[in-house]
Image: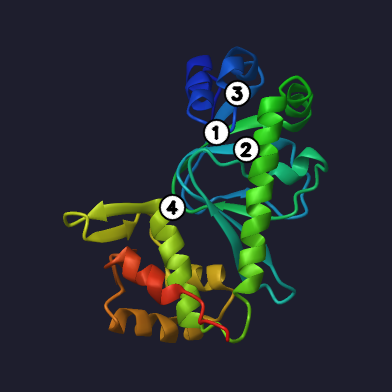
Amino acid sequence: MIINMNNKSVSEAILSCPTLNSANVEKLSKIGKVVKFKSGEIIIYDKAIESNFYFVITGVVSLYKLNMYGGKKAIFLLGEGKAINEAILSDEISSIFVKSMSDVTLLSFNRENFNKYLLEDPTTALKLLESMSLKLRRLYHQLKNTCKSYKLDKQIASKLWKLGKDFGISCLDNSQVRIRFKLSINELSDLMGATRESVGRSLKILVGRNLVFTKDGYFFITDIEELRKYSLHPKVN
């Protein structure tokens, strides 16, 4: 981890974060710092005491849990401007692992100092409440996707479509979209909460339909709208 306390860097990070109130950049700069992690580093450990609250400035992080057998289930992938660990605002014990999926730059605030600041800035407090609400809605959606009648290949299509929408880079005259960070089959399996073998078999269906392909560790979406259509839940009569 690399720490940068330079006021200019901290101010620039605050101004680039839509969740924070840019009108209070001077006050926030006094309690914030910029930290950097290399790809693959653990940023937060589950059930550990965590004294810092983070926002993503650049890069992508994965939030995940481990089951009793050590299996990993990725809950969220978060990119620029997103708050990572809102739960520690009420309890300093972390409830999830956070790992960098790429080189990342984070804006960090001491938990106690940030809580005191929020008492004076209802605008930022409300934006954080909206962030938590969005995460809750996405969790509801994930629970819906655990329905056994919803085939794994369609679940994977839905996940890749979302990743393409959130983290996609257009290429080949916008006819294709590349997810901007490398994603292995094991990591995709973690996102799906399924075995590597099951994900591999289902992924072959999407490749066979010319919806996605992989190259040099990256996922490419051939046609993001067709992938979205394929991912839709079957109609229930």
Residue 67 position within the rendered picture, expressed as x and y whole percent measured from the top left: 71, 72
- The disc at residue 35 is 1
Of mark 4 and mark 2, the one earlier in the sequence is: 2
- The disc at residue 166 is 4
Residue under numbered circle 3: 21
Q: Residue furthest left?
A: 173
Q: Secondary structure at mark 4?
A: helix
Of mark 2 and mark 3, the one earlier in the sequence is: 3
Residue type beneath disc 3: Asn
Q: Secondary structure at mark 1?
A: strand
Residue at image location 83% in from the left, 43% down from the top? 91
Is mark 1 in CB contact (under 8 Å) with mark 2? yes
Q: Secondary structure at mark 2?
A: strand
Residue under numbered circle 2: 54
Q: Quadrant of residue 184?
A: bottom left
Is mark 2 in CB contact (under 8 Å) with mark 3? no
Of mark 3 and mark 4, the one earlier in the sequence is: 3
Pointer 4 local density, CA inside 10 Å: few below 14, some 14–19, many at least 20: some
